[in-house]
Amino acid sequence: MKIIISLDYEVFFFKPSSDIKQSLIAPTERFLEILSKTQSKSVFFVDAGYLFALKRQKNKFDKLDKDYAAIVAQLQHIEMQGHEIALHIHPHWEDSYYDGYRWKMKLNRYKLADFTKVEAEEIFKKYYRELQSILVHQIVSYRAGGWCIEPFDYIKDVMKEAGIYIDSTVYQDGYAKTATHNYDFRKYPKKEFWRFSSSPAIEDKDGCFFEIAFTSQRFHPVLYWKVLFNTLLKRIKKEGNGQGVKPSFKEVLKKLFTINTEPVSIDAFKSQLLLKAFKKAEIKDKKYFCVIGHPKCFSEDTYKNLEQFLAYAKQPGHTIATFSKLITADREPQQQTSIVY
Ligand SMILES: [Zn+2]
């Protein structure tokens, strides 16, 4: 199986004064150490809007100057180790700013769909240039912030111009319609990998873009009840700084009373299901196993379960690699045997 461990390298929304060393740099460092033990490579989807926002204000604030330098240094180190750096876009940074004490996060325009097509194109180009300027390798992969990939038409042309041909945003049966999020993958191809041209919703065998979907799994409400119980008892010890956009009461209820489909994840408690999900994929003879993680959400569970998973997955027949390596192998089948890591 082709295994992709992808991280969304981004900061937390609701504790804007938090220390990035603790919420981003340190958990990423620990993740890298674990991966290096098995020489496994990963894909880092960098929230380039954050980089841009830091750069925009770093001359005014010493803290931002230090944060920017620490992040750039870590990303360059990650790239040098052979991991892939990819583009992740959260356009709410357009309206967010640092006031000298904390980040003032504005989420009114959370996804590219909240802008006009021209604005979305400009944001994409600006964030892409920002990230590409600190890297050696060409960026080839993209992930939409908050799963909000549509309308893909907004970014199709600029993505092509930038030479980005892989998208990894879709997860089977995923959907959400909230104040900030809007996506519905229930009618997308029920596949792990397909080509497309106008939208990942429609397969086009000759399309110039590739979609690598996340491996989805069904989360039983019992898991969320356990988390709720543990949270109430303050038993969950988090290393990172929590989660993304806070779910509404309605969304929390949905998780507590219905079975939810979500991507397989290495975040905190969700990492308990990682190995189980992989074994299930093995039985189903899946070709790809694509998982997500957020350094800001890592806990001791993450590190323990990741190590266990890597030890298991490190067998002949499985390859843990980056998108660029795997897709190159799929585009040029004659090279497949030589491509590992
Ligand atoms: Zn994100």
Image (tube, grey):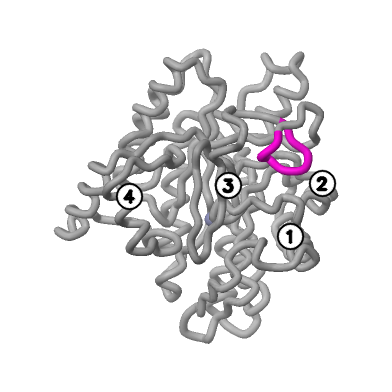
Q: Amino acid type of disc 1?
A: Phe
Precedes in sequence: disc 1 or disc 4: 1
Q: Which residue is labeled 1 in the image? A: 124
Spatial separation of the CA atoms under disc 3 and disc 4? 28 Å
Spatial separation of the CA atoms under disc 2 and disc 3? 20 Å
Q: Nearer the viewer, mark 1 or mark 4?
A: 4
Q: Which residue is labeled 4 in the image? A: 255
Quarter placement of the C terminus = top right
Q: Which residues are magenta?
A: 195-202
SS at circle 2: helix
Q: Amino acid type of disc 4?
A: Lys
Location of residue 31 by image quarter: top left
Precedes in sequence: disc 2 or disc 3: 3
Location of residue 251 by image quarter: bottom left
SS at circle 4: helix
Asked if disc 3 and disc 4 are in contact, CB closer than 8 Å, the reply is no
Rendered position, 123 above or below 162: below
SS at circle 1: helix
Q: Amino acid type of disc 3?
A: Phe
Asked if disc 3 and disc 1 are in contact, CB closer than 8 Å, the reply is no
* Label 4 beta carbon within 8 A of ligand 1: no
Precedes in sequence: disc 2 or disc 1: 1
* Circle on res. 44: 3
Spatial separation of the CA atoms under disc 4 and disc 2? 37 Å
* Circle on res. 160: 2
**Which residue is drawn at the image coordinates 44% and 60% (left, top)?**
244
**Viewer-proximal residue, 175 or 331?**
175
